[in-house]
Image (tube, rainbow, N blue to C red):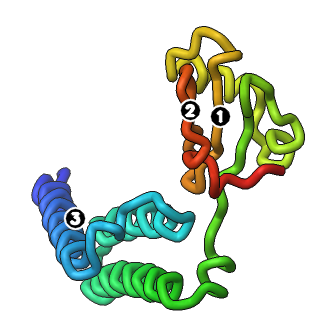
């Protein structure tokens, strides 16, 4: 005979443990700050991905030790990200070591093939971003930038303030 109580118990346990893990994450974000889930650096992105993975793990634990270990790992991820953010603020050396710089992929309507090759971004990907930004004419594209988050920004139009790309690396 099939035991129908156990599947419902497992369902309830999964829902409750996941809810606790999500609330724990909210508490950590309140303590560390909203920057925890920003995408300013690759470390911020890693924090977001790791936290999601750890929430999923916490929700599937069948014993208290592994559940609390997942919660402790979440706190560890936030603590490391917080410490790295402080170190970046206080030390130019650490900032340079940890910082990714945005890369210019296109300038004044011309593709920068060397930059695209070194960042492994295809021409078709850039063209897709141009379409998404409603670019109608390559000559109106002032800059396409691969941001530190992996996003691609498209700057186009007649007026263009060069300060927007001062910190952008040209390969």
The Cα atoms of the two marked residues, 3 and 2, are separated by 48 Å
Label 1 with label 3: CB-CB less than 8 Å? no
The Cα atoms of the two marked residues, 2 and 1, are separated by 9 Å
x and y percentages locating residue 68 in the rendered image? 28, 86
Q: Secondary structure at mark 1?
A: strand
**Residue that numbered label 2 is attached to:** 160
Q: Secondary structure at mark 2?
A: loop
Q: Nearer the viewer, residue 4 or 163?
A: 163
Q: Nearer the viewer, mark 2 or mark 1?
A: 2
Q: Nearer the viewer, mark 3 or mark 2?
A: 2
Identify the residue at horizontal 63%, vertical 53% (top origin).
166
Identify the residue at horizontal 80%, vertical 39% (top origin).
116
x and y percentages locating residue 88 in the rendered image? 52, 82
169 left or right of 162 in image = right
**Residue that numbered label 3 is attached to:** 18
131 left or right of 120 in image = left
Identify the residue at horizontal 56%, vertical 25% (top origin).
156
**Residue that numbered label 1 is attached to:** 143
Mark found first going from the N terminus, 3 or 2: 3
């Amino acid at each position: 005979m099939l035991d129908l109580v156990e599947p419902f118990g497992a369902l309830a346990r999964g829902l409750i443990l996941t809810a606790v893990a999500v609330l724990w994450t909210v508490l950590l974000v309140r303590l560390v700050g909203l920057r925890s889930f920003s995408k300013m650096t690759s470390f911020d992105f890693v924090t977001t991905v790791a936290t999601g993975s750890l929430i999923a793990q916490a929700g599937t634990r069948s014993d208290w030790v592994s559940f609390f270990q997942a919660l402790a790992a979440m706190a560890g991820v936030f603590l490391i990200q917080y410490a790295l953010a402080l170190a970046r603020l206080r030390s130019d050396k650490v900032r340079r070591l940890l910082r990714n710089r945005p890369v210019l992929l296109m300038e004044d309507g011309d593709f920068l093939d060397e930059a695209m090759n070194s960042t492994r971004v295809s021409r078709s990907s850039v063209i897709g971003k141009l379409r998404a930004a409603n670019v109608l004419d390559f000559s109106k594209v002032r800059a396409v930038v691969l941001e530190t988050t992996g996003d691609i920004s498209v700057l186009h139009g007649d007026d263009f303030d060069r300060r927007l790309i001062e910190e952008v690396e040209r390969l």
